[in-house]
Amino acid sequence: MVKVGIVGGTGYTGVELLRLLAQHPQAEVAVITSRSEAGVKVADMYPNLRGHYDNLAFSVPDAATLGACDVVFFATPHGVAHALAGELLAAGTRVIDLSADFRLQDAEEWAKWYGQPHGAPALLPEAVYGLPEVNREAIKGARLIAVPGCYPTAAQLGFIPLLEAGLADTHQLIADCKSGVSGAGRGAKVGSLFCEAGESMMAYSVKGHRHLPEISQGLRRAAGGPVGLTFVPHLTPMIRGIHATLYANVVDKGVDLQSLFEKRYANEPFVDVMPAGSHPETRSVRGANVCRIAVHRPQGGDLVVVLSVIDNLVKGASGQAVQNLNIMFGLDERLGLSHAALLP
Ligand SMILES: NC(=O)c1ccc[n+]([C@@H]2O[C@H](COP(=O)([O-])OP(=O)(O)OC[C@H]3O[C@@H](n4cnc5c(N)ncnc54)[C@H](OP(=O)(O)O)[C@@H]3O)[C@@H](O)[C@H]2O)c1
């Protein structure tokens, strides 16, 4: 049994970790933290977990208790893992961070986008970007994982086959992405209120969103050189889901794109390339650790349109985090993650 700690257990990604790990045969949650709900039993706060964690209660984060775990997930705002990860790694505990703390390899770029100095630049060289479809071998030996963001997961998985094959004009890539409201976390904010977010849709952060440098970093790696990316996120009136509509001009119209995508992901347990002409729906991945992708070339022109959907809380966060745990500990990658999506 892998002994698991979770820092930030009351948030949406924290409770999603609990839901997924409840079905995991080789992992056991030993510690779960919340400063605001310390002492409260997990199942009293989240009744969907009754019968699974009846003796587990939230506690205040404590490095010694967390350091007795085999692995600790950080499901916290940025900056928290910076402060604690070093101490846990020194105690021999592995760290899987769901926040953005270790996703950007450049500490100065991180400071620019997050408005504060990077809190643990010395750990960056060993941080592995936890996108298994790209970094599986590095994840196997890693002590510190940076779980990709939700928009970055949907966008990178959609663009990567084109870029790795050298087929896309890298000067102008466009990621037009929509997210459900749970992407903003559980904290109270006016913009997340039902009356504000319901029956409406809006773009935000068009001049620059924090996920832009992360997506660009991954696309540069896939392309082997610089990329020009326009990323426009939107808030949509649904609870879970990311829908990414990705545009790229292809430099060779003769390539069978359907077959290219099918081959790239043939051995990936959590990427589903749908039949040609498909339109994946966010509800087809709700609650499941799956990215469904369809590739189109409208009217046979130069412009390729890739549609990529994930559940932001599962393949976009906690499911991907559990996938990383499985790979790090030499377990079957699908443990705890093999259930189908909820539909309707
Ligand atoms: N929501 C998504 O779809 C999504 C997707 C991918 C990645 N992420 C990332 O995952 C992280 C968590 O997101 P979330 O949506 O689950 O957030 P959330 O709903 O706002 O929850 C944050 C959690 O962190 C704890 N926390 C806050 N400040 C802390 C501190 N200084 N020290 C220790 N614990 C602290 C909170 O509990 P207490 O305050 O009670 O301690 C709470 O349990 C964020 O970095 C987010 O960017 C989120």
Image (cartoon, grey):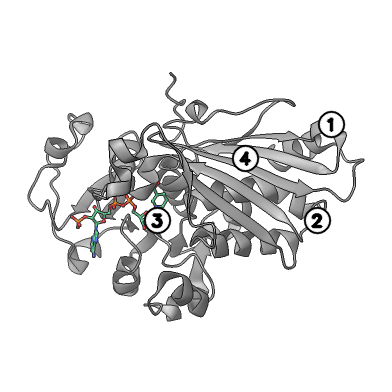
Q: In the image, is residue 192 above or below residue 48?
A: below
Disc 3 residue lies near ligand 1 with CB under 8 A: yes
Inter-mark Cα distance, 1 to 4: 30 Å
User: Which one is closest to the eye, mark 3 or mark 4?
Assistant: 3
Mark 2, residues whose alpha carbon is within 10 Å: few (<14), some, or many (≥20)? some
Inter-mark Cα distance, 3 to 4: 21 Å
Check disc 4 and give the amino acid type. Glu
Check disc 2 and give the amino acid type. Asp
Mark 3, residues whose alpha carbon is within 10 Å: few (<14), some, or many (≥20)? many
Q: Which residue is mark 4?
A: 268
Q: Earlier in the sequence, mark 1 or mark 4?
A: 4
Res 164 seen here: yes
Mark 1, residues whose alpha carbon is within 10 Å: few (<14), some, or many (≥20)? few
Q: Quadrant of the C terminus?
A: top left
Nearest the camera: 134 or 30?
134
Asked if the residues shown at circle 1 and circle 4 are in contact, with their CB atoms under 8 angstroms apart, the answer is: no
Secondary structure of the residue carrying numbered label 3: loop
Secondary structure of the residue carrying numbered label 1: helix
Q: Which residue is mark 1?
A: 299
**Residue 98 numbered mark, or none:** 3
Asked if the residues shown at circle 2 and circle 3 are in contact, with their CB atoms under 8 angstroms apart, the answer is: no
Q: Earlier in the sequence, mark 2 or mark 4?
A: 2
**Residue 169 numbered mark, or none:** 2
Q: Measuring from the top left, give residue 116's x and y in whole percent.
A: 37, 77
Check disc 1 and give the amino acid type. Gln
Q: Earlier in the sequence, mark 2 or mark 3?
A: 3
Res 25 seen here: no
